[in-house]
Image (spheres, rainbow, N blue to C red):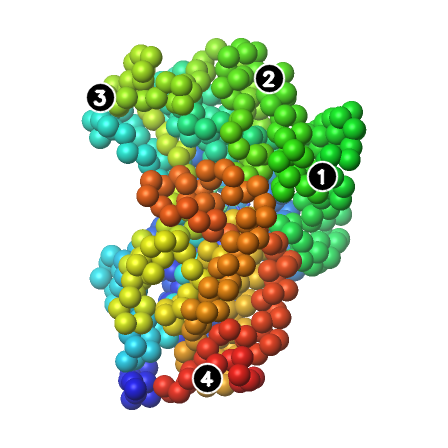
Amino acid sequence: MTNIEAAPAPDFDTVVIGAGFAGLYSIYKLRSLGFTFRVFERGDDVGGTWYWNRYPGARCDSESVEYSFSFSEEVQQEWTWSERYSGQPEILRYINHVADRFDLRREIQFNTTVTSAKYDEAKNCWEVRTDKGDEVTARFLITATGCLSVPQIPDYRGLSDFKGQKYHTGNWPKEGVDLKGKRVAVMGTGSTGIQAITAIAKEAGHLVVLQRTPNFSLPAQNALLKPEEIREVKATYAAIRKRARMSASGNVYLGDSMGKTSALDASPEEREREFERRWQIGGARLVVAYKDIGTDETANGTAAEFVRKKIRQIVKDPKVAESLCPTTYPIGAKRICLDSGYFETFNRDNVTLVDLKKTPIMEFTPTGFLTTEGEFQLDCVVFATGFDAITGPLLAMGIMGAGGRKLSEKWQAGPRTYLGLITAGFPNLFMITGPGSPGVLSTVTCSIEQHVEWIADCLTYMRDRGYTTIDTDLQTEDAWVNHVNDLADATLHVKANSWYLGANVPGKPRVFMPYIGGVGAYRKECEEIVADSYRGFNFASQGKSKTASAGTS
Ligand SMILES: Cc1cc2nc3c(=O)[nH]c(=O)nc-3n(C[C@H](O)[C@H](O)[C@H](O)COP(=O)(O)OP(=O)(O)OC[C@H]3O[C@@H](n4cnc5c(N)ncnc54)[C@H](O)[C@@H]3O)c2cc1C
């Protein structure tokens, strides 16, 4: 038995990694509760996703009034979003505003990457090391490292020989990139690619779009917010947030749009009218027009065909239109994209689509790339090729739990957690929006707030009772993982090669990572577990363990 009491106190109660939405709210919460902490952030300022993703066209695809913090009524009253879907500069300004207003930068050490985090059993603390030579200890470790913060660039032969400019959208230079008149290629046509392509086409001399898989994209119908819309939201903000917290995807706009009937009960004409109505309103409403679009392939097919018909109507060249039509997976099974004129972009004279399924890249050359059909000369290539999502940032940190076990070993066949918050054998490690929680399937700010609040309450609970260790057991964890898998298996989400499944990273285990049961259902589950004396969590103090479910409250 180790003697934790005899061990020196750690430097901090908590180390937090990351200073995006999740890290900033953690600072606010931990400080208000009197915990000591240090925050490490790789970037040189706050913002996370919105610090790194400065590519042309970058904007949110959740409605701005909901894609923001709800914890401060003052902030939500004083901040006014200009657009329905705000651009990256405005979102970054908002995050900076929050950081300034609550003086959140004080404890953040910027330009610092956490390179290892090791749980020391004898001292019951985490030893955290950084690339700047820091070595600090903390009782708890909170990862606020985001789900989309490790950019992925595919490994093409000759890429290192390419002499032009190379960028990944998730690591875009702060000073911007002048693409005016240049020969540019953008690889990737997911949410980011679609935004970047639409914007870059207007600037570049010639744009080559390198499409690996066509995606379903719906018009955002983005617009400036009218003063009366803003007034109405602000007058009812608290109520909107309350409903969002119990909704399916952490926002009211989509929650209120959920169809309650089957697509198959509607006549083709009725369906057409309903899909058209939702297409015109914009956003992701079309994919929730009927209750079974996400679960029934025939119902799903009606929505998918509607979008394909739209693509064929918009894109003038029938061959290009066919290449842009997704046909191999259900609509909504991959993250639905929202655009502002994406398909119209292919009617421009300066845009060429290269369908990599038909004409794969053989290699990059010093001046461009070579496909099975010929050579393309380029000044610049932009990779909008996504991220090692959800687990990537966690596995990149060299996390080692009890007994020196590596997280990468434990998760070799896919991530395993309880509630996406904790993983057995890694005591006192909390993950914000970890695998097994709704995270990326929700308006992420809503999920972040819930996790931060849950963790803060748990730390307070432990402090009040003198507990110094929290963990879970494999049985509890297995039951949660099975539950998450069962929920996903009942949907069409598992039918697409998406990043939710890790399919975009060669060699990554194919496991559906997020919890798909809905933000409200998940929150309820978390609350019930707490009410049931933190069912499934094991607490210990001074080397003595207590199973929470055995009644420790
Ligand atoms: C282009 C784009 C658009 C998006 N749009 C939406 C949207 O409309 N709606 C929505 O809900 N979500 C959206 N998302 C998801 C978005 O990531 C989340 O909404 C949210 O910003 C995540 O916040 P976070 O604080 O959890 O993580 P992040 O914002 O990713 O912040 C994590 C931080 O951790 C830092 N970090 C990571 N590893 C280390 C380390 N080892 N050491 C030190 N620092 C580290 C990173 O530098 C980063 O700053 C989008 C994502 C992208 C990429």
Circle 4/circle 2 CB separation < 8 Å: no
Residue positioned 60% across, 60% down in the render = 522
Element on which disc 3 rests: loop
Residue positioned 55% across, 84% down in the render = 551
Q: Earlier in the sequence, mark 3 or mark 4?
A: 3
Tell me the residue that label 1 is attached to: 290
Say left or right for 80 vs 267.
Answer: left
In the picture, the disc for residue 366 is: 3
**Structural distance between the alpha carbons of marks 3 and 2:** 36 Å
Tell me the residue that label 4 is attached to: 546
**Structural distance between the alpha carbons of marks 1 and 3:** 50 Å
Residue positioned 41% across, 56% down in the render = 415
Q: Amino acid at mark 3?
A: Pro
**Structural distance between the alpha carbons of marks 2 and 1:** 23 Å
Residue in the foreground of this view, choosing between 397 and 102: 397
Q: Decide if ligand 1 comes within 8 Å of the CB at mark 4.
A: no
